[in-house]
Amino acid sequence: MYIPHSLYQPGDSWLHHLHPLTKLVFSLAAIVIIFSGLGGWLSAIIVGLLTMLLLWLAGLAGQVVRSIFQLLALLTVVLFLVHGLFNPNNQTILLELGPFAIGKEGLVFASTIVLRLAASLAASLLLVFTTHPAQLVQALTEVGLPHRLAYLLGSPLLLLPQIAGRVQIIQAAQQARGLETQGKLLQRVRALFPLVAPLVFSSLVDVEERSLALEVRGFSAPNPKTSLNELVDTPTQRIARWAMMLLAGLLLAVGIWWRAYSGY
Amino acid sequence: MSLKEQLRKDFSTITLVLMAVAIVLNIVLGQLVSLLKLPIFLDSIGTVLVALLAGPWAGGLTGLLTNLIWGLISDPVAAAFAPVAMVIGIVAGLCAKYGLFKKWWQAIISGVIITLALSIIAIPIRVYMFGGLTGSGADFITAYLLATGKDLFSAVFITVITDNLIDKIVTALLAWAIVKGLPKRFTSRFPRASAVID
Amino acid sequence: MVIDVNGLTYTYPSTTNPALKSITFQVQSGQLVAVIGPNGAGKSTLCLALAGLIPALFHGQMQGTVMVCDMDTQQHAPGQFAGQVGLVLQNPINQFSGMCYTVYEEVAFGLENLGVLRELMPKRIDQALQQVGLAELSGRSPYTLSSGQQQRLALASILSLEPSVLLLDEPTAMLDPQGSQDVFEIIQRLVRAGTTVVIAEHHLEWIAQYADRAIALVDGEMILDGAPRDVLSSPVLLQAGIGWLRYTQAAKRGQAYGLWPTNYPLPVTLEQAVTGFQQAGLISSEPETNDADPS
């Protein structure tokens, strides 16, 4: 099902068919390893390349690279600029531009950050691109996520298009009454309350009726819940998940020890 | 009251529905306000609302889940700041609990406290994960501070505070006004709301 | 006795005026009871009280007792009523779980909550969908349905729990005439099959035709309780602002002109009106075939 603003792309790749938890564990393990700082930016490069390989095998590499670019391009430029010029650790001058000097330490710092971010983003996008959020919630429920938390994760997804739709309506109605949303700062500030207030109040009004509907459908009944659907899982994936978790934990521990002892 | 009972009371069905709606409000309002190009975000108004009506833990969880969900469907970067959003909810709830949300000027003070608290949590995330920068206009401030010789931590701290102060004060005021304006029949379902309305 | 309400007086928290005052009535199994009254009379409050949601969720002050399916609403949590008592509200969309992407899953929601075994679910879901006529739409998203279909889905998601008592609080308020008609027909079928139904409604015409009993609430008090013909033709309804059906008004006016037999009960349905006018000699006992005859 289509979710607005969503990065999820329905598809048929082998990644799409993996159990959601496998992908979740992969993403989290990858991020942990990347930020454990092991080997400086080496862990970022290795994990990043591994992730890109997996994505390439699924035919999604191009899309992921495009997304990473969109999300990080501006930040990358700013990082290199600001740290190249102003990083307090700048000692080695590489280039002088008038009163400004570009320092090596700043550039190294910026590139480490960018590499780590790009690799982490790739790992998260592997999950996000190929997993429908509702399936992730279902997967978590199967391993014991309490149904109340499952509700908190799952229902905003369906509620989002509904309330977002109201924004259009309220905006149109207020503009018909002469509300200015462009123009000077003061005008835009004034536009704020007539847009925000109806949205908030109309959403809150529904809260009571919704909660009653949940109650009469047994939401707060204390018995264990059952589930209509069941996700497909394989022993291979289960083993793989445990292996990844162990590996990430191990590398994290090593990374912390290494930092502590080498005064990174 | 045992912990389990207190949890069940704090997370009643109506609180859960409120939280789900608040999560969506956070996302939708954040988007709406960014269209208006104002120097505020209003993307934690739902969080503060929940904190005022249902307490710090519900508020904290609302903030946390907002960022996780938004990270899952649209912008993974947001997920990194989930702890910041959580702190906003927890601190707002604690301010309300200790009587700092009864009058409008108290709401302003709470907004300041929230800003300080979130800045503390935001700094390590910003510095270690993002090199202190965001790709937004606030980076000019950081750059300027770095150029004048400040270290990265201080520069980021000052930037985060300046960036967030107005937004959190406005958010706190709006949330306070909304809770005050809600019908009694609604707020009576939330025992903790009495810290704000009575 | 499936529903036994005794001296029910209920005041919402932070209010002084009780929403319900000393309500007493019983409902037998399989009855269709309609509750009428102006807005704010307490119809919704009564539905919530019968569903066991008041006082458990709303607190406030309650006197008297409400027993539904042999359970005292002051002694049992709402979750315990869920499989026995169903409640359908006005706004279809607010009744969706918000977690389900298809009609089929939505109907399963309650079953999952009550811990029904997966193997037993398809039969109950199919049955509920049949009852409301949505079997062909089981794969659709609930949010793409018409409001009438959505309300039928809300109904189905309650019916899958197989409640013996069904409460409805103005279920057709947000529906168009066809949607309302569909809902009413489902209720009629359910009553014929043995479900006890209590419905708060404004559609006096349908109530007159199909309800076994009508209760009138005004300002929290039960002012009338009896057969629809008696209740809906009582002058008390006019004072209370609920009003009369057109047939009743016409017959009443007609009495003054000898067009309606004196001391003859006022009609609340078309058939009753026709019979009464026949009695008064106004119409011959043989209806003429007439193109303009609406019946």
Image (spheres, rainbow, N blue to C red):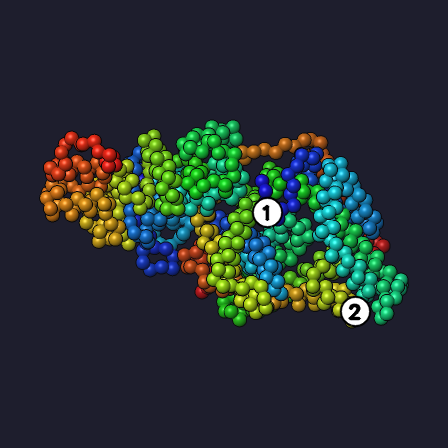
**C133 is higher (above) or lower (below) than B66:** above
Q: Position of residue C70 (x, y in %)?
A: 34, 38
Image side of residue B36 versus residue C30, left or right: right
Q: Position of residue A8 (x, y in %)?
A: 64, 43
Q: Nearer the viewer, residue A178 or A233?
A: A178
Residue labelled with disc 1? A4
Q: Relative to C174, is C157 above or below?
A: above
Residue C274 seen in the current view: yes
Image quarter (top left, top right, bottom left or bottom right) of the N terminus of chain C = top left
Q: Residue at x 41, y 56 (%)?
A: B185
Q: How many badges with numbers are in the image?
A: 2
Query: Which corner quadrant of the image does residue B155 belong to?
Result: bottom right
- Report the quarter where the C terminus of chain C lies: top left
Indicate which disc residue B147 carries. Answer: 2
- Residue B69 image offset from top left, x and y in percent: 61, 49
Q: Position of residue A183 (x, y in %)?
A: 58, 66
C23 sits left or right of A235 in the view: left
Q: Amino acid at mark 1?
A: Pro
The residue sitting at 31% across, 58% down in the picture is C17
Question: Can residue A254 be seen in the rendering of this structure?
Answer: no
Q: Secondary structure at mark 2?
A: helix
The chain containing the residue under callout 2 comes to: B
**What is the three-letter code of the residue carrying label 2?**
Ala
Secondary structure type for disc 1: loop
Pick the residue in front: C94 or A13.
Answer: A13
Check contact, mark 1 vs mark 2: CB within 8 A. Answer: no
